[in-house]
Image (cartoon, grey):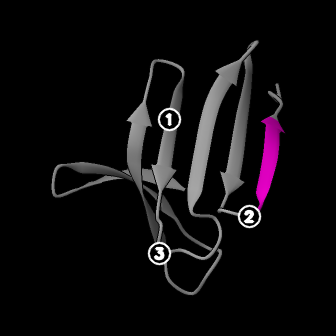
Amino acid sequence: MKIITKNDTLFLKVSGVNENSTLFKFTQQTYSSFVCENLQNEFPKKITYWLENKLLKAAVSNDDFKIDFIFKSIH
């Protein structure tokens, strides 16, 4: 994954899952979170990342299903 700019718009580019990369447009941003969406994608349609109690959390979802993630720091 990486964040790219295309036509003055931020996208989260997800590679290595499917044959072609998938772009998710940034639709919301705050100091400690962001939401990216691609409503044409089957799953996920929405990717959310946020900081909570010094932990990075994420959720990937579509209209019917959601998977939550919690990332731990490795030193």
Magenta segment main secondary structure: strand
Q: Which residue is mark 3?
A: 40
- List x then y, in percent, for residue 33: 54, 28
> Does the magenta portion include 31?
no
| Front disc: 2 or 3 | 2
Q: Quadrant of residue 14?
A: bottom right
- List x then y, in percent, for residue 41: 53, 74
Provide the secondary structure element on which disc 2 rests. Answer: loop
- Residue sitting at 65 percent across and 62 percent down? 62
Name the mark on residue 64: 2
- Residue sitting at 39 percent across and 44 percent down? 27
Left or right: where 34 falls relative to 49: left
- List x then y, in percent, for residue 7: 16, 58
Point out the image quarter for the C terminus. Answer: top right
Label 3 Cα crowd, 10 Å radius (few <14 / some 14-19 / many 20+): few
The residue stretch that appears in magenta: 65-70
Point out the image quarter for the N terminus. Answer: bottom right
Provide the secondary structure element on which disc 3 rests. Answer: loop
| Front disc: 3 or 1 | 3
Q: Which residue is mark 1?
A: 34
- Residue sitting at 50 percent across and 83 percent down? 20
